[in-house]
Image (tube, rainbow, N blue to C red):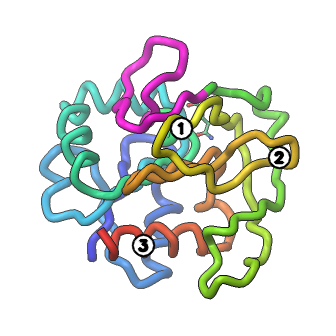
Amino acid sequence: MRIGVLALQGAFQEHVQMLQRLGVAAVEVRLPADLEGLDGLIIPGGESTTIGKLATTFGLIEPLRQFAQQKPVWGTCAGMIFLARQIGRDQPLLGVMDIVVERNAFGRQVDSFEVDLDVPALSANGSQPEPYPAVFIRAPRLVEARDGVAVLARLADGTAVAAQQGHWLATSFHPELTGDPRFHAYFVRMVAGA
Ligand code: GLN
């Protein structure tokens, strides 16, 4: 199995390391040709406007859309924004996943926070999994999950922060910045099952 990590800007190196820790070959993706032979792709957190601009410059938008139609893709934070169909402003997006997302929904950089989340989907054997430590950095929130989108995690106030639609996964937070590999393992299982 080979999983790509979009390596234009942002926290891609941490995703690569997490995949390697799980014994998965990780490939940095900067050009359309880099997508060849990959089984899945992670779009990291960073700055979605910058990622969109660079993806446009390098001719990646259409190849990424085509890839996403066929293979599992996971967007974290800015990556979730990049996957969303609608964000209420004009910037380059893949726009494949039926979610409406609001950028910077929790305030500024200083309002970044870490919280333990209940994520039943991370259960390996049907038992209640340990809480997942989630890091939010100028994070987006899921305003609307349309038909076919399952919400995987919510904050205590009900705000949706992780969702899956078929082979697409989106998280508001940064699972590559905590030492907990369970979200990456979950995505690896999605890729293995695709
Ligand atoms: N605020 C960033 C954006 O709008 C996302 C922040 C992040 O990825 N940590 O793209």
Mark 1 lies on a secondary structure that is: helix
Looking at the rendering, in which quadrant would you find the C terminus?
bottom left
Q: Dot 3 corresponds to which residue?
A: 188
In the rendered image, residue 128 lying in the magenta stretch gets the answer: no
Residue 117: which quarter of the image?
bottom right
- Left or right: residue 182 versus residue 53 is right
In the rendered image, residue 100 lying in the magenta stretch gets the answer: yes
- Left or right: residue 185 versus residue 159 is left
- Left or right: residue 89 versus residue 42 is right
Among the two numbered marks 1 and 2 on one chain, the one whose residue lies closer to the N terminus:
1
| Three-letter code, disc 2 | Phe
Q: CB of residue at label 1: within 8 Å of ligand 1?
A: yes
Check whether the beta carbons of the residues at disc 1 and disc 2 lie within 8 A of each other: no
Check whether the beta carbons of the residues at disc 3 and disc 2 lie within 8 A of each other: no
Q: Position of residue 146 (x, y in %)?
A: 51, 35
Q: Dot 1 corresponds to which residue?
A: 78
Q: CA distance from mark 1 to mark 2?
A: 16 Å
Q: Dot 2 corresponds to which residue?
A: 113
Q: CB of residue at label 3: within 8 Å of ligand 1?
A: no
The residue sitting at 42% across, 48% down in the picture is 43
| Three-letter code, disc 3 | Val
The residue sitting at 37% across, 49% down in the picture is 7
Image-quarter location of ligand 1: top right
Among the two numbered marks 3 and 1 on one chain, the one whose residue lies closer to the N terminus:
1
Q: CA distance from mark 3 to mark 2?
A: 26 Å
Q: Of tags 3 and 2, which is closer to the observer?
A: 3
The residue sitting at 33% across, 76% down in the picture is 192
Among the two numbered marks 3 and 2 on one chain, the one whose residue lies closer to the N terminus:
2
Q: Which residues are magenta?
A: 82-101
Above or below: residue 60 compared with residue 118: above
